[in-house]
Amino acid sequence: MAKSTEEKFLDRSYPEPNTGCWLWAGVVDPSRNNYGRLYVDGKMESAHIVSWRLFRGEIPEGLVIDHLCRVPICVNPDHLEPVTQRENNIRGISPAALNYRKTHCIRGHEFTCENTMLIKDGSRRCRECLRRDHRREYENRKHREYYAKKKAERGGKYYINDAVYQEKQRCKRET
Ligand SMILES: [Zn+2]
Ligand SMILES: [Zn+2]
């Protein structure tokens, strides 16, 4: 049987303990802001959008999904927010955002002296990323355990954001 979208999503993401980001370990498309990419029902989609649909539902009409953490390959729904395209553009080119891209790798680790490896061609590599690549399997296993536990606690439904979950429970009680 083909894997469900949820399974594929969990296979390809793992948590970054320091920032709380869920980093995408699958295909990344540099021509689309370094967003993670994933096949869903025969269509290539952005991983953070798939995340929003899995955990939060439909994207409100006319809005796009923005990264609050500014880490393009992050797929943690708690770090995502629907905003207008205009707002997204403004945020993307703000001085803070431009500076962030210079001072942090695509996974959100800071390019400090200790954390930066200089390559002959003048580009930089993030040491934390190189280290984490080796730990990915371990992190992914923890990720799955955490996910399974939360899901079991909540009768097969998993809302990462407790505020959202509680709100839904409250609405259920009141109706
Ligand atoms: Zn994030
Ligand atoms: Zn890094």
Image: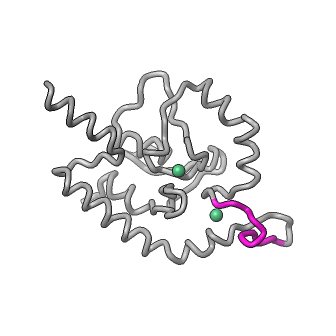
Quadrant, the C terminus: top left
Residue at left 42%, top 44%? 50
Q: Is residue 140 above or below residue 2?
A: below
| Count of number-bearing discs | 0
Residue 104, magenta (yes or no): no
Residue 145: % across, % down: 30, 66
Residue at left 54%, top 57%? 19
Q: Main secondary structure of the magenta part?
A: loop
Q: Nearer the viewer, residue 48 or 93?
A: 93
Q: Nearer the viewer, residue 155 or 24?
A: 155
Classify residue 175 as left or right of residue 113: left
Q: Please state the extent of the stretch shown in magenta in the rendering.
A: 109-119
Please tell me in which quadrant of the rendered image residue 87 appears. Answer: top right
Residue 105: % across, % down: 68, 58
Q: Is residue 171 above or below residue 139?
A: above
Residue 36: % across, % down: 53, 51
Q: Nearer the viewer, residue 39 or 130?
A: 130
Please tell me in which quadrant of the rendered image residue 11 appears. Answer: bottom left
Residue at left 29%, top 54%? 4
Residue 111, magenta (yes or no): yes
